Image (tube, rainbow, N blue to C red):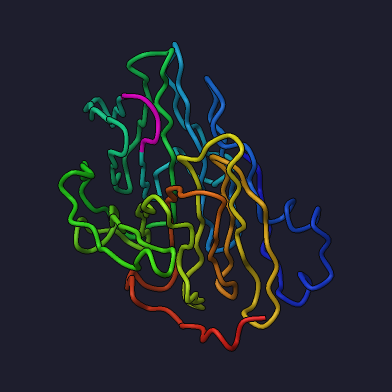
Amino acid sequence: METRYAIHPEDMKKYTTDDLRREFLVETLFESGQVRLTYTHNDRMIFGGVTPSENELTIKLDKELGVDYFLERRELGIINIGGDGTVILDGTEYDMRARDGLYVGKGTREVLFRSKNAAQPAKFYINSTPAHHQYPTVKIDINEIKPLEMGGPGTLNERKIYQYVHPNVCESCQLQMGLTMLSAGSVWNTMPCHTHERRMEVYLYFDMEEDTRVFHFMGRPDETRHLVMKNEQAAISPSWSIHTGTATSNYTFIWGMCGENITYTDMDHVKMEELR
């Protein structure tokens, strides 16, 4: 597990492109037969990819977190973006097709990940945050979520927002997680943009062709920077940073948030004339 430390916005003003990518971009999350995680000190979220092939995989973090097992004091959100798979929680199996989600409550001792077909492995994207209370595990089927439909073709941002770990779907301590799918011909997400001083966020971009690129904008609204990202890469967004992007084609992204509250609409909106 890689550790990323929190950065003051004044420090970012001095960063080169390489510095920005080193601190805020995670380039490899899914590797066959591997668990690849990043621990950000921004609200202490852990995120990353679990890609089982022939053998089951598990997350073994105890010494790093000062606990006896990974979810002793944490909750977990999972969305599968690969082939069919299975998640086994303390002996109970949950089939996970593409785009299926799972909320796992604090106190779950054993979490195992399995692919149905090693040639088409599952790709389990996870977000985990500290938790103070144990809530029930909930399986989430994308076909049972009524998406929020936003934007339009005239502004190049026609999209559907699927809320997975959200008060409308299941209870959680501080984790929120969902998936936004852009329509063909649309490339902008989250514009006009916003910040939320009370929560940090991570974006995972996927469903992109090999030569498609996302230009992910970040930084304070009056002094923005950008990251050029490709398929299945993630960007860390501190609470003081905008998080919005455009791309050379449409794409899908998973957003995960944690912090002071679980109010999805708690945002500090940025007027277009304030962006620089």
* Image quarter (top left, top right, bottom left or bottom right) of the N terminus: top right
Q: Nearer the viewer, residue 159 or 111?
A: 159
Q: Nearer the viewer, residue 156 or 40?
A: 156
Per the picture, the main secondary structure of the magenta-coloured stretch is loop
Q: Which residues are magenta?
A: 80-85
Q: Is residue 175 above or below residue 140?
A: below
Q: Is residue 81 above or below residue 213?
A: above
Residue 89 x/y as whole percent:
28, 32
Give the residue at x 31% y 39%.
99
Q: Quadrant of residue 121?
A: top left
Residue 185 in magenta stretch: no
Q: As drawn, is 112 to the left or to the right of 139? A: right
Give the residue at x 27% y 30%.
97
Q: Quadrant of residue 88?
A: top left
Give the residue at x 39% y 45%.
72
- Going by the picture, which residue comes out furthest to the front? 154
- Going by the picture, which residue comes out furthest to the left? 144
Q: Is residue 275 above or below residue 67?
A: below
* Image quarter (top left, top right, bottom left or bottom right) of the C terminus: bottom right
Q: Is residue 104 above or below residue 135?
A: above
Residue 160 x/y as whole percent:
30, 57
Residue 9 x/y as whole percent:
71, 75
Residue 259 x/y as whole percent:
45, 68
Give the residue at x 44% y 40%.
125
Residue 81 in magenta stretch: yes
